[in-house]
Amino acid sequence: MAIQQARSISNISNAAYNWARKNLFGSPLNILISLLIFPLLVYLFISSIDWILNEAEWDAVTSNIRLFLIGQYPQSEVWRIGVVSSITTMLLGISWHLKGLVFRRLSLIILLPLITLILIPPIFLDISIVLRSWLVVVSSGILVGYNVSRFWSISSKNLLISWLLSMLIDFILLRGIEGVEILPYVSTNEWGGLLLTFFLAIIGILLSFPLGIFLALGRRSKLPFLKGACVVFIESIRAVPLVTLLFMALIIVPLLLPEGWRLDRVGRAIAAITVFSGAYMAENVRGGLASVPIGQTEAAKALGLGPLLTTTLIVLPQALRNVIPAIVGQFISLFKDTSLVVIVGLLDLVGIGKAVVLGNVEYINQQAEVYLFIAAVYWVFTFSMSHVSQILEQSLGVGDR
């Protein structure tokens, strides 16, 4: 075991040395640039660490960690979030065992921050025992799911169905049911923080992805009316910023709904985000459709497949595979764009940070700390999405012939 670890460390060291020699010291110009920039980077790194550990005041973050996580969600119903998180992490653990590298990396990326929060001593991070216990339960869900899948075989189809059903169950748990005492209704207007950011991003992705595919196929359609309608929709939406759509959804959508119908602010924000992201997704998918050789369609016709089967079984899977980087880039952009809902009065992660800083005099000088914390949270999740997409590209051989 010790020999294997020594070899592993040696291989990593050799790889690092070869990379530095090739990229940093491969030519006289590279050597000069590296020698000029390296001391500056070291100085900035040391100064940043010193500021974070010794000078920065993190009371605004540590004292309001609950607000940053779940906003104004009722304290008596917080157990629902624990159940939802446990269901999600268990499915993630099952997927890790059954689907390999992509979910394994995703699980580890989620586990590391959770374990770090659990192990940080209270003197440095003053979070309650209840929250630490909740983090332990959520973290252990991944390990429980992984071990359950070792003894309980589940097919890929059933796993996909389980994920879809879990999302529906999670929404019902979080929102509740009107008139049911054991699961009282909690308006989405009371959601906030990271919970609201996740909800907007996940629902936006789930709705904008099929919308983008439909618009891309419609734009390539031979039916003049369908093609024209899709072109007008895509170009009109892409011509305005998301902020404009958010304000339009907030003001105009209630006027368009039938009398007696009501859509809360979160629902209107989701509508704007979905429409905006769907238009951009359509162009990404259209690029993928254009990249599929015409010979694929001709071969499908020769085999007797109709237009519908040719598109769904032959052309579309190849098109989506070819544009995975662009699609994931759009998902990352959507995740970050959810921060704009603060403009229309929703307290997502950025909105909570703004409210904490401006609503408390004692935190007015801690804006840098608060927004650095928010930036770190966004970086963790966007980096995770990017990293997982790279693994998916490698597993599918994107770019290989």
Image: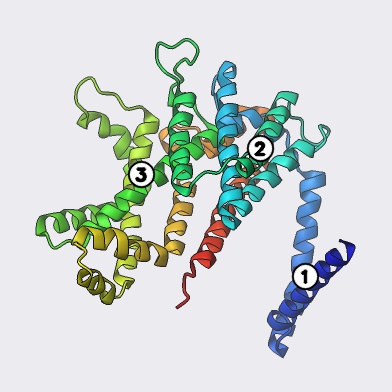
Which residue in the structure is indicated by mark 1? 12
In-image side of 50 versus 161 (left or right)? right
Of residues 119 and 32, which is closer to you in this image? 119
x then y, percent, for residue 188 = 44, 26
Q: Is mark 1 on a helix, strand or loop?
A: helix
Q: Nearer the viewer, residue 356 or 9?
A: 9
User: Looking at this rendering, what residue extends furthest in the right direction?
Assistant: 2
For numbered disc 3, what is the local secondary structure? helix
- Give above or below for 35 relative to 286: below
Q: Which residue is drawn at 83% across and 33% down?
A: 123
Q: Which amino acid does label 2 sit on?
A: Val
| Displayed quadrant of residue 266 | top left
Amino acid type at mark 1: Ile
Residue found 76% across the figure and 73% down from its top? 16
The earlier-in-sequence mark between 3 and 1 is: 1
Q: Which type of secondary structure does the marked residue at label 2 adopt?
A: helix
What scheme was used to colour the molecule?
rainbow
Asked if 227 appears above or below 146 in the picture, the reply is below
Is disc 2 surrounded by few (<14), some (14 to 19) or many (20+) residues within 10 Å?
some
Q: Earlier in the sequence, mark 1 or mark 2?
A: 1
Q: Residue 207 carries which label?
A: 3
Residue 3 placement (x, y as % from top left): 88, 67
Which residue matches tag 2?
A: 144
Residue under the point 56% across and 40% down: 91
Disc 3 from disc 1: Cα separation: 42 Å
- Mark 1 in CB contact with mark 2 (< 8 angstroms): no
